[in-house]
Amino acid sequence: MKYRFIRNVLILAALPLLAASLTVVAADWSPDGKKLLFWSDWNGNLEGYAVNIDGTGLVNLTEHPAEDANPVWSPDARRIAFYSIRDGNGEIYVMNSDGTGTKNLTNHVAHDFNPAWSANGDMLVFQSYRDGHGQIYTMTADGTSAKNISNNNFVETNPHWSPDDSQIVYVSIRNGSRGIYSMNLDGSNQTLLLERKWMNFLNPKWSPDGNMIVFHSLFDDIDHERGAIYVMKKDGTDIRKITGDDTYNFNPFFSPDSRGIAYNIGDNDDAISIHVMDADGSNSRLVSDGTPNIN
């Protein structure tokens, strides 16, 4: 079903969507907390969009016939990094916050995706297949000095910077499941934070105050794929489930003040929408779904 496809997009690559249902995926908060970035197949192919937190002011930022996905704000809100196949394979690009000035940062024959900014805006962390399997790389914000920092034989994905720029939290496929790990910026001290047999943990994100990590788990059953959103302390303790798992709740992002979480919900009709909730899981409200009214 579509959730399984979206999961693979988030883990491995932004590939073409295969179903007709409307999809809005991811919801990265702007630094001022007023907007969300996401990607959608509303116009027939994947594009990067921005929308106000109340669901108004929707803007298509990429407007390109190739697929664009995974947009994320720079800390100063002046730039947006994103994934695109507009040059024939998966690359990481940057553009101005209004969609102008697009530049290919990675420009490599291998597949590069899942970008995330450092807190000071000087660097990006991303996932690359240039070593034959998924590894975590860093590069400067102008695309130079790319370096493999995970440098192992496992498949690593979903990297995200700590707010003090000293660590990376990420997902590693070891021991038959996807666990959450952290490591220092130079790749040292690779530490398991959370792993459970028969469960897959995905898309960990640090809270801007540095105290918590939000992530989602994935469960498969006979009828449909389900997911729930959790938070835990940065050392992997005090794990709390903050959503149900009757639908697919996934891809959470903390708000800039660490008091809210934006996330996606997939329903049993394969539609995916954006919601926001308080950091304890209460007060969930819809931001965007259905056919957009592009401004």
Image (cartoon, rainbow, N blue to C red):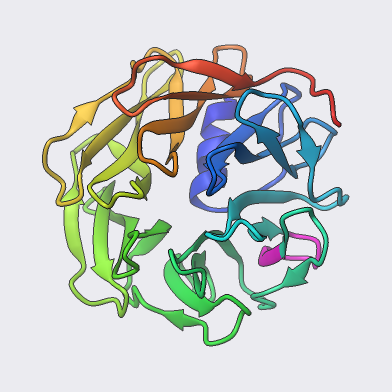
Position of 280 with respect to 136 (left or right) is: left
Residue 55: x and y in percent read 67, 24
Residue 136: x and y in percent read 42, 69
Residue 86: x and y in percent read 80, 61
Position of 254 with respect to 23 (left or right) is: left
Task: Pick the residue in front: 88 or 143.
Answer: 143
Q: Quadrant of the N terminus?
A: top right
- Above or below, 173 against 42 in this view is below
Q: How many marks?
A: 0
The stretch drawn in magenta includes residue 92: yes
| Magenta stretch secondary structure, dominant | loop
Quarter holding residue 272: top right
The stretch drawn in magenta includes residue 274: no
Quarter holding residue 73: bottom right
- Above or below, 90 against 277 in this view is below
Residue 148: x and y in percent read 42, 79
* Residue furthest to the bottom: 145
* Residue furthest to the left: 237
- Above or below, 224 against 65 in this view is above
- Above or below, 95 against 47 in this view is below
Residue drawn 62% across the image and 73% down it? 110
- Would residue 131 be visible to someone looking at this image? no
Question: Magenta residues?
Answer: 85-94
Task: Pick the residue in front: 61 or 104.
Answer: 61
Position of 219 with respect to 255 (left or right) is: left
Residue drawn 52% across the image and 59% down it? 75
Position of 111 with respect to 240 (left or right) is: right
Quarter holding residue 39: top right
- Would residue 42 be visible to someone looking at this image? yes
Residue drawn 51% across the image and 15% down it? 285
